[in-house]
Amino acid sequence: MSVQSVQRALTILTLFSHRRPVLGISELSRLMDLPKGTVHGITRTLVDQGFLSQDEQTKKYRLGLKIHELGIVLSGTLELNQKAAGPCHQLSRRTGLLSRIGIWDGGSVVITLNTHPNPMPVLPHQVGPRIHAYCSAIGKAILAFLDEKTIRQYLDRTRMTAFTPHTVTVKKKLLEDLKATHRRGYAIDRQEAVQGMGCMGAPIFDHQGGVAGALSLSGPVNQVLGDQTEELAGEVLSTAAEISRLFGYFPAIMETGAS
């Protein structure tokens, strides 16, 4: 198979989403701007390898179980998940809220780990696995600790769409929010991504002091951003710091060494 064929096969896989989980040859041909015969040959190979499955009646395609299998392998072997799983489960049990881990990838955040308390709270939506950074606590927690050039590049190429009446869509206001996040050490999502949901997020640092990812705590807005806000913020910060230490991040030692 040529490199071009591989690129086309990968592009076909990325066309599937929550909004369009099923696609036919005609749709794929239109979206790819390729002849139906070419698309059919690629999809046939993807079906044979388990990356796509085809409905026998409609003849349309959806993602295959091989994608799910590879996702499980990645999730289980990702260093951030391995280090964060224990602390996140403990955080969820202590607070009764959903805890998540996410990493920065191509201008957005990919959720790599979800830990639910028992019993699991009823949330409006299961957001993810890829979410916008500008309107999520986990995303803003990462953005606020990136270098200024990266932040500017992100703002230049990002269209800030409103998902709720609370979503911040003015870049100047977002920058002010990121500065406040950097000062206090954690980010706040005030129903910006999902109506009725509040969230806090804090960065996780690697051994060199770079941002390895972020941790968030989510739940009903009156619970997360109510009377317990200060206590929950402390929980998020201490858990993120614990995971950072597992990466070898000890800020006091780094500051001493730099002086």
Image (tube, rainbow, N blue to C red):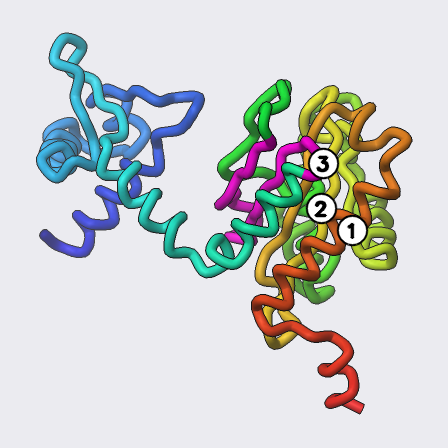
In the image, is 191 to the left or to the right of 2?
right
Residue type highlighted by circle 3: Thr
Q: CA distance from mark 2 to mark 1?
A: 5 Å
Residue drawn at 20 percent across, 31 percent down: 52
Residue drawn at 53 percent across, 38 percent down: 114
What type of secondary structure mainly makes up the magenta span? strand
Is residue 105 a member of the stretch shown in magenta? yes
Identify the disc placed on residue 83.
none
Residue type highlighted by circle 1: Tyr
Residue type highlighted by circle 2: Gly
Magenta segment boundaries in residue numbering: 94-117
Circle 3 SS class: helix
Identify the disc placed on residue 201.
2
For discs 1 and 3, the disc positioned in front in the rendered view: 3
In this view, which residue lies farthest toward the right? 227
Residue count near mark 2 (Cα–Cα under 10 Å), binned few <14, some 14–19, many ≥20: many
Q: Which residue is mark 1?
A: 186
* Residue 254 image point, x, y percent: 72, 82
Q: Which residue is mark 3?
A: 95
For discs 3 and 2, the disc positioned in front in the rendered view: 3
Q: Are marks 3 and 2 in contact (CB under 8 Å)?
A: no
